[in-house]
Image (cartoon, grey):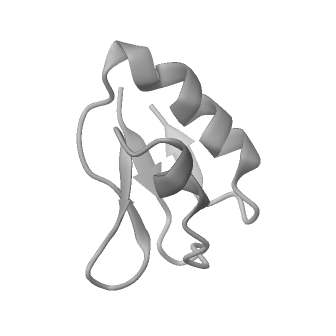
Amino acid sequence: MKGYVDKDLCVACGMCAGACPEGFRMGADGLAEGYQELPEAALDDALQVAEDCPVGAISVR
C-alpha cells in the first residue's frame, strides 16, 4: 500500500509528514507527497493520517 496526496487539495500543513514520515514528506513544491510503499509497521499511522487530514487530501491504497 502507498499514501497518495491530492495536491489540488493539500494546504501544506505538514501533519501527514510529521505523523507518518515513513510514507509522507513535504516535496520541493512545499506540498505533501506520498513517496514510497508503506512499511507494514506504518500502515496504521498512514490510515490515521488519511482520516485526520484537515482537507481530505490523503488516501491510502
Q: Is residue 12 above or below residue 53?
A: below
Estimate the x, y position of residue 59 in percent, counting from the top left.
Answer: 54, 44
Q: Quadrant of the N terminus?
A: top left
- Residue in the image at 47% along x and 58% along y: 5
Q: Is residue 34 above or below residue 57?
A: above
Identify which residue, 24 or 55, lies in the foreground.
24
Q: Is residue 9 left or right of residue 1?
A: right
Identify which residue, 58 or 44, lies in the foreground.
44
Estimate the x, y position of residue 21 in percent, counting from the top left.
Answer: 39, 46
User: How many numbered discs, if any?
Assistant: 0
- Residue in the image at 43% along x and 24% along y: 42
- Residue in the image at 69% along x and 55% along y: 53
Identify which residue, 4 or 40, lies in the foreground.
40
- Residue in the image at 76% along x and 62% along y: 54
Residue 31's quadrant in the figure? Answer: bottom left
Q: Is residue 27 above or below residue 53?
A: below
